[in-house]
């Protein structure tokens, strides 16, 4: 069984660039105010979601392991 992730978007930081939707259309949607929302806040780990988080120009997306809360992105320093 693979890892499960908790995906969150800080809508106070999100600028609505849409990069997350471009990288992971199955993972994110933009609302009428162009704020990003994860389609499934708890989801199986997958590369498009990680790519979307890494590509967010303001780092509004965080991903943590659902079981432990350990940071997947952004990585802990």
Image: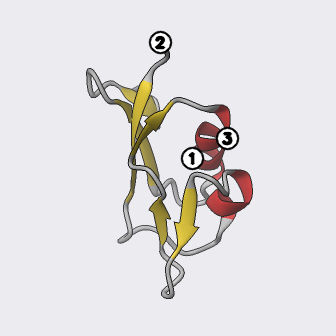
Q: Nearer the viewer, mark 1 or mark 2?
A: 2
Instruction: Name the residue carrying label 1.
Output: 53
Circle 2 SS class: loop
Q: Position of residue 11 (x, y in %)?
A: 38, 69
| Label whose residue precedes the other's in the sequence (2 or 3) | 2
The answer to whether residue 38 is above or below residue 14 is above
Q: CA distance from mark 2 to mark 3?
A: 19 Å
Tell which residue pokes out farthest to the top in this image: 1
Seen in the picture, residue 45 relative to 37 is either above or below; the reply is above
Name the residue rendered at 57%, 46% in the picture: 53
* Picture mark count: 3
Please state if 9 lies on the left or on the right of 30 as rendered. Answer: left
Question: SS at mark 3?
Answer: helix
In the rendered image of this protein, does residue 11 appear above or below residue 3? below
Residue pointed to by mark 2: 1
Q: As rendered, which of 73 and 34 lies closer to the eye?
A: 34
Q: Quadrant of the C terminus?
A: top left
Q: Quadrant of residue 21?
A: bottom right
Distance Cα–Cα, label 1 vs label 3: 9 Å
Q: Which residue is mark 3?
A: 48
Q: Residue at x 65, y 69 (%)?
A: 18
Q: Earlier in the sequence, mark 1 or mark 3?
A: 3
Q: Residue furthest right?
A: 22
Q: Nearer the viewer, residue 53 or 57?
A: 53
Q: Residues within 10 Å of mark 3 (few under 14, many from 20)?
A: some
Q: Position of residue 39 (x, y in %)?
A: 48, 57
For image coordinates 26% across by 21% down, the residue present is 68
User: Which residue lies at the image location 63% right of the left edge and 48% below the top edge?
Assistant: 52
Q: Position of residue 38 (x, y in %)?
A: 46, 57
The mark found on residue 30 in the picture is none
Query: Secondary structure under badge 1?
Result: helix
In the figure, is residue 67 to the left or right of 19? left
């Amino acid at each position: 069984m693979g890892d499960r992730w908790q995906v969150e978007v800080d809508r106070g930081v999100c600028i609505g660039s849409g990069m997350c939707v471009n990288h992971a259309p199955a993972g994110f949607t933009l609302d009428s105010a162009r704020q990003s929302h994860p389609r499934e806040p708890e989801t199986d780990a997958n590369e498009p979601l990680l790519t979307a988080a890494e590509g967010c120009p303001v780092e509004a997306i965080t991903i943590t392991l659902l079981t432990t809360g350990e940071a997947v992105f952004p990585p802990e320093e």
